[in-house]
Image (cartoon, coloured by chain):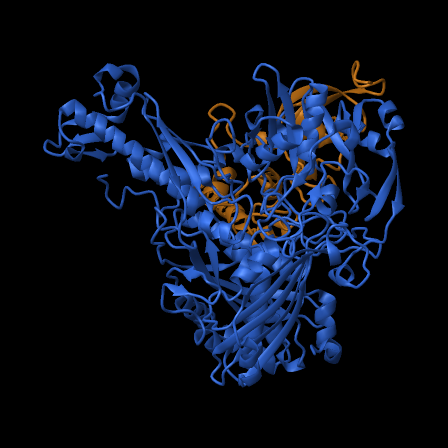
Amino acid sequence: MKSTTQDRLVGRSVARREDPRLLTGNGRFVDDIELPGMLHAQFVRSTVAHGLITDIDLTHVRRVPGVVAAFTASDLGLGDITAQLDRPLSEFVPTAMPVLARDRVRYAGEPVAVVVARDPYAAEDGLEAAKVTYASLPPVTSEEQALAPGAALVHEEAAHNTLVDVSLFATEGIDGIFDKAPCVVHVETRTGRQNALPLETRGAVAQWDAREDQLVLHTCTQIPHQVRTVAARCLGLDERAVRVIVPDMGGGFGLKCVVGREEIAAAAAALRLRRPVKWIEDRKDALTASFLAREQHYTARAAFDADGRILGLDADVVCDMGAYSCYPFTAGIEPLMASAEMPGPYKVPAYRVRGRAVATNKAPTAPYRGVSRPQYVMVVERLMERAARELDLDPVEIRRRNVITAFPYTGVNNVTYDPGSYLESLNLCEQTLKEAGWYDQQAAAWAGGRHIGIGYSCFSERTGYGSAAFAARKMEVVPGFDLSEVRMDTSGAVTVTTGTMSHGQSHETTMAQIVADTLGVDIAKVKLHQGDTDRITYGWGTFASRSITVGGSAVRRAAAKLGDKLRAIAAAQWGVPPEGVELDRGRVRLRAEPEAELSYAHLAGIAHLKSHLLPKDIEPGLTATAAFDTDTDGTFSNATHGVVVELHQGTGQVEILAYVCVEDCGVAIHPQVVEGQCRGGIAQGIAGALFEQITYDAQGEPSATSFMDYKVPTAHEIPDVTIHHLETPCAFTETGAKGAGEGGTIGAPAAVLNAVNDALRATGTELDNTPVTPETVHRALTSPVLEQTP
Amino acid sequence: MNDTGGMGDDVQLLTLDVNGTSYEVITPPRRTLVDVLRHDLRLTGTHVGCEHGICGACTVLVDGLPVRACLMFAAQAEGARISTVESLADPGSGELDDLQRAFTENHGLQCGFCTPGFLMLAQGFLAERPEATKEEIREVVAANLCRCTGYQTIVEAIDACATARRAQRAAGTEETSCN
């Protein structure tokens, strides 16, 4: 394509194409869908954390004015949702998640029956009339309880409540390395259970379309095709007979990356009643009974030589996955991620890890932005800080001595890292904080008795996982590739499909930028379709920062193929070989005679309306399809975060004074969008480090049932973030881009925790658990000995 | 099955003034303002995020002041002027107003679910306090929740809009005084 750099849209922050409708109230979210005759569903949910259902009496529910129907599991007879790993029983125990609980409940909030009414108020009235009796079983509310000898079993088939137990790596002789090492440091860390908390709760509108002989399920999901698969299986339909449509989505962050029970139950009710059924989750259910994440316990140690070079890393990870395995990722999602990736950006010569997932009587878990990486990065970065103190090294210097600098680098975890800017990001981040005077301010503050701390985190993040990388995790359902179809109509307008599913990431803009550049068309002529299983061939949705890397590459390839067809059609008109013509801003030009040109609309007209003019070897129509998969280990984005905090003794408050992020996601398709991902990710990371935690009482009752009890940070708590970009283009994605969706969240907890500990330096206290609450900080500042880490 | 007829006996007729249009709604008294706006009047730009007044996604203006439409019964809004996000853009051309433009220029939205609430919050606040500093804007932005942006660009968008409005007013005043 002939275009100057000036014409290129990739790399420019063009106007977001999603914005006009979202700013004017013209978006269409799932709760905005209103169908004639539509009914409203809500769920009778378990009031106990663990118990046998002895009776469900819905007689009074059915008599409530406005209630149309109420169904239990036995009324609907649905198949279970079962997620599998391709691993032996010693490593993974599959467990089934029924759509509605049958004879047993495993967490408070588990759906037991669905009530369908003519309006949402009547549905809630109906819930109050339900009578469910339980024979309580002892609740398992923590990882310690789950693993204790003689513990009650959440699933009879899972001994010791252990769903996953894998030891992926164990370097031979690692114990000897630790025995002989001049410096060995330990960290034990617990991280709080969190809710990914998209502001739009989950929801669905299901409708049986008799003419199409098809169930239409509108739902806000990151993985439309996987929802279709499960819905079809549970309902006993062919996949063709289920159409999943995703309207605008109010965030997801992983919580909507798994198949929920409620959308299947709503679909079943719609099938049964032959009426449209809407279910919109309320905030209480979203907090207590959706999908949670991040409750992990690490016991880790690292060995260093006298110069601060790491010799070995040894870790035990236990993840509290709640009551069920999520589809398609399973309860292995967190322990497998931590085990596979923990060495991160460092040259770690010896590595041993055991990763476990335990079942407890809590709401189940889903992948949440970053998946385990916010946690293990925190652990590894605490080990780095602790070793720096032991060896009297500067915390940035010890990282400098350990980061990977020569690429490609194959790590002890059998992963090959493509080029990145680990050292450069570290140096630039430190330099930025130094030049802003924070080191001087810290010295002055310390002299004046104030508690100011500076902390860093340095990490790399695998993005663009292809099927090879997911297969290595031994998922039975192996995600990875993406497909795109690009179509041009006779007006020269371009329709492009992607299997990814934007829920705030701006794909309608960024994918259109890629197409516009590839074909040389006006971006206004390009329209993206996503999230409709009848409109797009197949897709894996949006997760693991895969959309631009994998999805964007498929889009680019399909657009290039369409360009080839345009050239072929034009070349045939002139009777020259395709090499004799070129694409140039909406036209095909004859190289030999640059003034000879055919517009795309004209060529599209030939392809559709005058196909008799096409040579025999060119098929009519103007469509191209392409796939992309990553056949390497994926591509690694990287970043360093630097944070300055002040601890306030009286209130125990952690105030963030400055936040610097130096990130490298390769070619940034839309720099403003990348920055938005960084800032939003960092806010969620800070939330985990300082504020948010889902807790339960001894009976397994969730304590946080509203935003009064679950502290979501506001503009008061989240600071402005200074962002610097480095650019190490990816060699094998079509655009040079690497993923940018999760890094902010991954880096923030470690950097914040390190800054807090730096501020506590004079007290001799170190904090290793998150969230760091005001109470902990207050106590650490006032009576440090109580918080001493063993 | 009770799915017959209307909404039962206990309904009332309300007259609501929304975005300058007068609507008559027959509704049960327990229905919230946000539900009536969204589902009876089909003004779905206003969103529901928590139903307990914390997240602010449902913020609308009632007599010019920001209000949580999830905490108010529709009946309580009778006789008041209600403005929703649908009132901001030019009704004829659909052209964005200056506040909406500032949001898109500053990337003050990602998924867009919380955005109408922030727009109406800012609209009400800037009308009341056109001289607001960036720090004051940050205080007000802290009234609502956003899970995507980290708030920085929302604050910057509102500040940019306020600054531009002040500059425009100053230019207008100057012009008036010259004439």
Instruction: Give the vertical position of B68 relative to B81 (above or below).
Output: below
> Left of A481 or right of it: where is B119?
right
Question: Is A521 or A74 nearer to us in this picture?
Answer: A74
Give the quadrant of the C terminus of chain B.
top left
Residue A390 visible to an observer of this rendering: no
> Left of A519 or right of it: where is A188?
right
Identify the hue of chain B. Answer: orange
Q: Residue furthest left?
A: A592
Instruction: Give the vertical position of A496 relative to B125 (above or below).
Output: above
Residue A119 visible to an observer of this rendering: yes
Label count reads 0
Q: Quadrant of residue A64?
A: top right
Give the quadrant of the N terminus of chain B.
top right
Question: Is B84 or A18 nearer to us in this picture?
Answer: A18
Residue sitting at x 22%, y 25%: A569
Residue sitting at x 75%, y 34%: B72
x and y, in percent, of residue A561 in the image: 30, 34
> Left of B11 or right of it: where is A294?
left
> Left of A622 or right of it: where is A397?
right
x and y, in percent, of residue A321 in the image: 68, 53
Residue sitting at x 10%, y 31%: A593
x and y, in percent, of residue A182 in the image: 54, 86
Q: Quadrant of residue A314?
A: bottom right
Identify the hue of chain A. Answer: blue
x and y, in percent, of residue A139 in the image: 82, 53
Question: Is A228 or A33 nearer to us in this picture?
Answer: A228
Question: Is A665 or A317 nearer to us in this picture?
Answer: A317
